[in-house]
Image (tube, grey):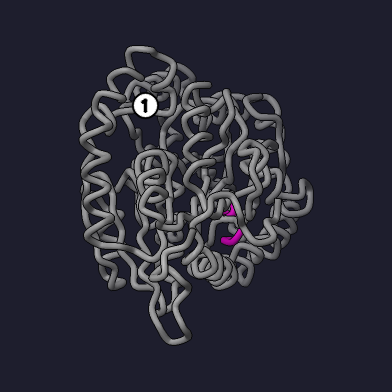
Amino acid sequence: MTRPDAQPPPKGKTTKLLCVNHSAKLSGGEIALIAMARGLSPAMQCTLVTGEEGPLLDAVSPLGWRTEVVAPPTALAEARRDFGSSVTGVFRLLLSTAPFVKKVNAWLKDNDPDVMYVNSLKAGVLWGPVARLRRIPVIWHVRDRLATDYMSRKTILLASVALRFSATTIVANSRATASTVHRRCHVVPSPVEEEFFAVGARRLARPAPEGRAVIVMVGRLTWWKGQHVLLRALARISDMEWRAVFVGSAMFGELQYEEELRALSAGLRLDSRVQWLGFRPDVPALLENADILVHGSVIPEPFGQTVVQGMAAAMPVVASGAGGPAELIESGVSGVLVAPGVPAELAGALRALLTDRNLCHRLARGAHQAAGECRASTIVPRLEALITATAGRTAPGQPAEADS
């Protein structure tokens, strides 16, 4: 069944697009959403709803987006990917869900969007089924692998049921992510904004810098991102000239890992050569002044936002060879892939790059060229076309000619 008022708008008309994201903090999925927001056409009348105040709202507001916070109860807000591992945790969530569902239903009734774009797993679980009951078509962008190395079995089951029940169209950020969804998906990589490509063009036009190399790792501080792997790899090449910069902060209650990283750095006697910059909004400028980018996830990365940003910035990238990065990089041509979680292999790749600047330049050129497939100017129109096609269709699981 299709609502009469939910048909795709005639040419020249606007589509009332509702984007929902549980967090307003900036991580990979939120950065991709901002890039999409900057590239959408005026045909999209956009609203962003998050579960909290934060920089994501500040980033889209100047673009003419309406923003609003619809805060879930504490138990839902604090739930993590592994919340389902505890029976008590599931019970607490069920008790807190009903009032929030009522709040979501009232919001959707009052605002009546043409289509809802789900940008995070928790937002999809909380908003997707309610939208489905209201016959609002849902395009669900899956940015997390639904796998037990990444989240609990109960969480996977909950997300899978919500997807099956509510998603009209499913988008996955990589083939690796799509393979865990077990539904037909459109595979669309996250968009990379032009400023990273501009950095890359400048880097390729100038001579390779001399002296001590700067190795950079960008990403929030969490164990699966593998900052500890890089620290142990750096200890193996302490005889070489380098300094390392870690960009990112601990999020979602993971301060203990940050403390462990600093203790490890001190124990390996790396403190004089390592900088911890925390979250920084000026990542393109930081990449322009670095030499090698490292991605160190110990489990398969769903996509690899920092990987493709580094590639666009014409940097030689060393990445864990599983998940999304293995789709982005052709090892030896547009970067180097290493076994996840193996400091010795990462150290070997870094040593090779530090001793061969010609290799660095060749890989940088290959990376810059390969990243072109992820330009925002190419990706955002694809996403907008899917959004427009989804508006007006209410049956879940019927995407037109999915990619995977």
Quarter of the image where one finds residue 318:
top right
Which residue is rendered at x = 58% and y = 46% of the image? 303
Which residue is rendered at x = 50% and y = 70% of the image? 388
> Mark 1 — residue?
258
Of residues 202 and 114, which is closer to you in this image?
Answer: 114
The kind of secondary structure the magenta stretch mainly shows is helix
Q: Give the image location of residue 30, x and y in percent.
A: 40, 51
Which residue is rendered at x = 43% and y = 87% of the image? 12
Quarter of the image where one finds residue 344:
top right
55 inside magenta stretch: no
225 to the left or right of 62: right
233 to the left or right of 25: right
Q: Give the image location of residue 368, x and y in percent.
A: 65, 63
Quarter of the image where one finds residue 200:
bottom right
Q: Give the image location of residue 115, x and y in percent.
A: 41, 62
In the image, residue 128 above or below residue 60: above
Residues shaded magenta: 308-313
Circle 1 packing at 10 Å, graded few (<14), some (14-19), many (20+), is many
Which residue is rendered at x = 41% and y = 70% of the image? 4
Q: Residue furthest front?
A: 1
In the image, residue 318 above or below residue 369: above
7 to the left or right of 229: left
Q: Secondary structure at mark 1?
A: helix
In the image, residue 58 above or below residue 245: below
- Amino acid type of the residue tagged 1 in the rendering: Glu
- The answer to whether residue 265 is seen in the rendering is yes
Q: Give the image location of residue 17, x and y in percent.
A: 38, 65
